[in-house]
Each structure stands twice: as structure tokens, then as C-alpha cells.
Image (cartoon, helix red, strand yellow):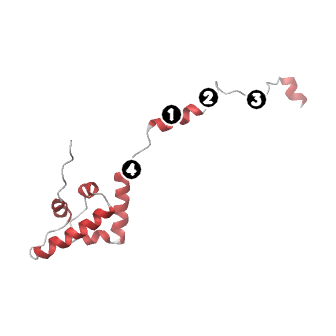
Amino acid sequence: MPQKKINKKSIIIRLVELPKSGMRIFWPKEMTLLKKLEEKYSIEFLNELSLSKKYNSLAVLFNEDFAKEIDRRFKNFNYKPKSYEDFSCKVQKNKFDSDKQYNKPIKSIKDFLNE
């Protein structure tokens, strides 16, 4: 099943406060900024991204503090935990007490006290 195409304009509308005037300048500038963000992050992540409030421009996201926060969210977005199969191999390699073979001979109490 093909993935649904993501509308970039809706991403901008969701993240940025639209100006009352100057729309001719606003849209090309914001689309350019969104493309720069898309080079660094995936469009799927940007579609899921939510901010605490709407800002005047996407240029805010290039700020050092915002960039660190978005990098952290992007890592969380792409995080995939290790599968159980990886852990099961380690458990099988480790032997349990009943399976272990000891090289030391079993000593009696008399042998222990003579040492």
C-alpha cells in the first residue's frame, strides 16, 4: 500500500503562526526553511513534530537550543530497541550452574584441613 503523501504546507501551518499580510514573501521563505530542515530530519518526523506554541518562522528551529531539543526528539523518533533474539543468543551461550563443568576436583574436609 503506497504511503500517503505528506503536505508540506500543512506542516508549516501547524508549526508557524501565519502573518496577516505579506503572504507572498512568507510562503517561499518558509518552504525554503522546511526543505533545509528536511535535509537534516525526515519529512515523517517533521510531520509528527509538535511544539509548545506557534512561532513566527521556522528559522527559530535553527537556533542552537531548539536544534538540540529537536535532535533529541529525532533520535527518540528513530530509536528501535534490540530484539529479543539478540538477548536469547547471549543467554544460551552462558551456562547455568547445573550445566557448568568444574575443573577443580572435589575435596573432602580432611583434604581441605591438611592444606
Numbered tag placed on residue 79 in the rendering: 4
Q: Residue furthest front?
A: 2
Picture layout, residue 61 above or below residue 79: below
Residue of label 1: 88
Q: Would you identify the image quadrant in which residue 45 lies? A: bottom left
Residue shown at the point (60%, 33%) measured from the top left? 94
* Dot 2 and dot 3 residues touching (CB under 8 Å): no
Q: Where's the C terminus, which quadrant?
A: top right
Q: Residue furthest right?
A: 114
Amino acid type of the residue that numbered disc 2 sits on in the rendered structure: Phe
Residue pointed to by mark 2: 96
Residue 103 - label: 3
Q: Residue at x 11, y 74 (%)?
A: 24
Between disc 1 and disc 2, the foreground one is: 1
Between the residue at mark 4 and the residue at mark 3, the CA separation in whole angstroms equals 44 Å
Could you tell me residue 85's position as x and y percent?
46, 35
Task: Please state which of residues 31 and 99 is positioned toward the viewer in this rendering.
Answer: 31
